[in-house]
Image (cartoon, rainbow, N blue to C red):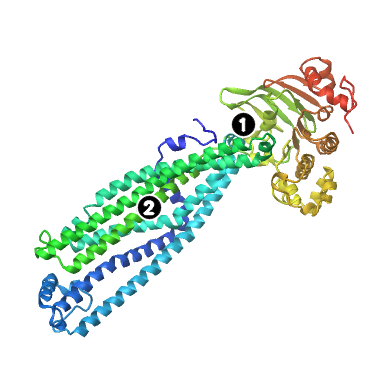
Amino acid sequence: MMRDRHGAFEAEVSKPKEVGATLRRFATYFRPYWPQYLGVLLLMVVSTWTQVMGPRLLGQAVDCFFTPAAASSAFSQVPAPLRQTLASAAQPLAAGASSTCWYDPPQPGWTADDYLAGLGQLTLALIAIFVLGSVTTGGMFFLMTWSGQRMLKTLRVDVFKQILRLSVGYHVQHETGDTMSRVTNDADTVQQAISFALVQVVSGVFLIVWIGYAMVSASPAYALVALSILPFMALATVWLSSQARRAFRRSRREMGSVNAGLQESISGVRESQAFGREDENIATFRQVNAANRDANIRAVAFTSALAPTLEALGYVALMLVLVVGGIGLLSGSGLMGSPLSLGLIITFIAYVQRFNQPVQQIAVLWTNIQSAIAGGERIFGLLDVVPDVQDAPSAIELTAIGGAVAFEDVWAEYEQGVSVLKGINLQAEPGQTVAIVGPTGAGKTTIINLIPRFYDVTRGRVTVDGHDVREVSAASLRRQIGVVLQDNFLFNDSILENLRFGRPEATDEDVMQAARLAHADTFIQRLPEGYQTVLGERGTGLSQGQRQLLAIARAALADPRILILDEATSSVDTRTERLIQSALETLMRGRTSFVVAHRLSTIRNADQVLVLQDGQIVERGRHESLLAQQGAYHQLYMSQFRRQAETTGGSPSGLATAPA
């Protein structure tokens, strides 16, 4: 599976999708709100009934009141030829007026006032129907929005849970911006469809079916004429909407690429400015935006083509109704043996207009549904990702541990067939400090990632107090492991809450005690609001050393039995390093500690030093004994650590004590 510049998978566009499966997935989220959706359905029935009854009553107004009245002697001012024509048009109703007219059909000898009174009653009925239609339509949209927003809340929470549940490896391989796009842009697309488009499409389909039935009931032959254009509408809708769905799927993917590029550029703005890469980044971002623009233009092109196509076909249907009905009415022969009246023609004209409106609405809104389906596919695609690291069904809760860690013939790989660790064996007793050194890419970070089970081994096993880490719950394991990294993440929250992150129930005094242990209390107290100072994103406003001290304090507050330090004293000045080193020595006391470092001061007093090369432990022992072997560690010391020893006043032999 190939990935493009911004990590979007081509398969998301090229691979055929099962629309029905996506809709069924949505249905599982709708299910808890079935009473509300049942209410929406009932209101939809009433609303559709009012829209069908309107044209029918208009036709009755013509056939039952206007035409007979104009043809009768009650309106003597109507010219005789016109009365004769109107009387002829009213003949089809003569045999069964009571069954086809308003509840009080015209009677022989009615006066002009009688006709006007009957027409007034029918007008009031029409007004009541229109008001009822407006109220039910409003209620329908309110219920749909109410339940839809709650469904979307559940969907977003599920996506967020999945993001936190996914293994570290997934987040390493996928851009943050593209993942965020599924929670924001794709979810917003689904929201727009649920709040408006979906109910419009469903009610439109319902109205089309009901009007079609009403046409057939009124005059099957005339209905055949009015609906003869429907197959062409269906073909146009199916083809253009399928093209729009593919275009919108690509549009959602490109939007993910835009977000990924934006997030990357914002996070790396300092590097961009430092290396003068602003113009190149702008050009790259412009290119990604152009791809997103093209995808949206293609989608809109199909949307724009569908609406006028169906509108033109609707006018053709209207023309057929007018021409065929007019010819049948004027000739007096009806249509294929079926009688025609002026009111029936007017009813069918209104029916065709009402019929065309939902067809055109569906054409426009269906593209929104298609876009929502494309967004839903991306969301469900994320939800369907199986985490690489999962608790076994029989996983046990790891209770308080002593801190013994063992690697037994451990092999590990990130890419299938490419081993990063090869047969690692080590034993760390409770309270020991294990230093891991070696060149870049030797596998140091991989070793410490296996202890909290951020990744799983390919072969062998990692145990904590004799328990295979794959046989205990990850949460219970990680609660007893503290991690201090080179670049620790601090949240946009107060210092107090950042330190309390690993132990939410800790009191303020506990937090301050941990800060004092990490030598962070002094600089915290100097801040304008002390422990209540709100940090910027990733700890903006603090120095690298201050962020490290806060990370140490956070780990100290969690009181872990196993401590992992990954380059914890790199990228700081010597004075800050000594401060951090002092805090770390206090923190490591009595805990099993694994230290990955390029600084000599962090490994001199380690109980054992592991020297890694090409994923294998080539030497192990204490600092002094390894130097005496004149092997790989000695070479590493001479090339990397000797200058540090001389800078701190130690002897070239490496036997100097650690700095105070």
Answer with left or right where residue 391 lies relative to residue 612. Answer: left
Q: Secondary structure at mark 1?
A: loop
Q: Earlier in the sequence, mark 1 or mark 2?
A: 2
The amino acid sitting under disc 1 is Asp
> Residue 519 at what x, y percent from top left?
84, 43
Q: List the residue tagged with mark 1.
A: 456
> Residue 292 at what x, y percent from top left?
49, 42
Answer with left or right where residue 203 lies relative to residue 110. Answer: right
Q: Is residue 463 above or below residue 555?
A: above
* Tag in front: 1 or 2: 2
Front in this rendered view, residue 591 or 119: 119
At x 35%, y 54%, the residue is 362
> Residue 361 at what x, y percent from top left?
36, 56
Answer with left or right where residue 551 lies relative to residue 335. Answer: right
Label annotation for residue 153: none
Q: Please rate how many residues cluster around mark 2, counting C-alpha atoms within 10 Å: few if below 14, some from 14 to 19, many from 20.
A: many
Q: Secondary structure at mark 2?
A: helix
The amino acid sitting under disc 2 is Val
At x 51%, y 57%, the residue is 150
At x 41%, y 45%, the residue is 299
Q: Is residue 463 visible?
A: yes
Q: List the residue tagged with mark 2.
A: 364
Q: How many marks?
A: 2
Q: Is residue 167 visible?
A: no
Q: Is residue 62 above or below residue 28?
A: below
Front in this rendered view, residue 56 or 402: 56
At x 54%, y 45%, the residue is 181
